[in-house]
Image: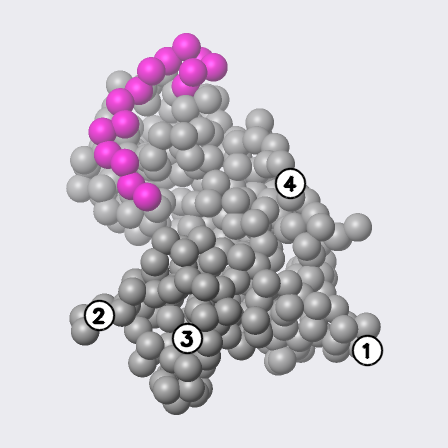
Amino acid sequence: MELQQLRYVVAVAETTSFTRAAERCLVVQSALSHQIARLERELGARLFERTSRRVSLTPAGAAFLPAARQCLEAADRAAAEVAAAVGEVRGRLAVGLIPTVTAVDIPGALRDFHERYPQVRISLRVGASDDLVEKVRGGSLDVAFLGLPVSAQPQGVALHELARDALVAVTAPDHPLATRDAVSLRELAAEPFVDLPAGTAGRLQSDEAFEAAGLTRDVAYEVTTADYTARLVAPGLAIALLPAAWARSLHGVTVVPVVDAPQRVECAIWGRETRTPAAAAFLGILEIPVE
């Protein structure tokens, strides 16, 4: 079993095509197919079902794929550690963030990092805090930037607090509350809300605050990313509670302070045991201590 064979398997699984996988791996299709067939003979099982229309993983292939990815990631980390030992930073840097992060300039930091370490392959994933924690814990992301309830303590990762921010009410410009200097959770509780799905870190910030105040609210609209909330708030369909620093960048809505507002913590996380030289260098650019 060779690393190149594992790369071919991952490429076919991700592209669902031998042709596209060969293009990604910069080899001719016949060579890629030959190596996968050779690996299947060695394993004694077919990894892919091949038809004229599609390529899909067999049960054996689905079982093999996570371990293949782990082997490739371990090989990449090993090569990066060797390079770091002789003063070079290379390999990969996989970064995750939620859309509402404002405490750090991620695009600017990535630009500075690329200029300083051009041999590192950078990837970026935007998602929900809960999903990003799992991916850092599992090693598919090196660093992530989150917004969490003050009560949250993600396990299995190293964490550095970046900033704390109160949530604010976001309403349509012609909403009756839009002219107020400030509002309370009790006043907001009667309004229909747009929020993230129940159970997510972004939703918990508000749910815990209303529960602590002995209040209930109606979340009439659920969206998977905070970016879409303004499109429902602006025409008056609902109101929202959003991080103050980020909410001020929205257009077509009005921001109103909340006197008993829930708080959130923006933080950076990385793997405790799997911090790569590239991740350490990126955190260094952001002046985030890692020891």
Q: Which mark is residue 156?
A: 4
Query: Does 100 sit above or below residue 200?
Result: below
CB atoms of marks 3 and 4 within 8 Å: no
**Mark 2 is on which residue type?**
Thr
Does dot 2 land on a helix, a strand or a loop?
loop
Q: Relative to the observer, which residue lies in front, 154 or 80?
A: 80
Which of disc 1 and disc 3 is earlier in sequence?
A: 3
Q: Residues within 10 Å of mark 4 (few under 14, many from 20)?
A: some
Which of disc 4 and disc 3 is earlier in sequence?
A: 3
Is residue 282 visible in the rendered structure shown here?
no
Residue mark closest to the camera, 3 vs 2: 3
How far is disc 1 from disc 2 in space, using C-alphas?
48 Å
Residue at 64 percent of width and 68 percent of height: 75
How far is disc 2 from disc 4 in space, using C-alphas?
42 Å
How far is disc 3 from disc 4 in space, using C-alphas?
38 Å
How far is disc 4 from disc 1 in space, using C-alphas?
30 Å
Query: Does 189 sit above or below residue 174?
Result: above
Residue designated by label 1: 86
Q: Position of residue 114 (x, y in %)?
A: 60, 75
Which of disc 4 and disc 2 is earlier in sequence?
A: 2
How far is disc 3 from disc 1 in space, using C-alphas?
38 Å
Residue designated by label 3: 37
Residue at 70 percent of width and 48 percent of height: 272
Q: Which residues are magenta?
A: 210-224
Residue designated by label 2: 51
Left or right: 219 as drawn, with respect to 115: left
**Mark 3 is on which residue type?**
Ala
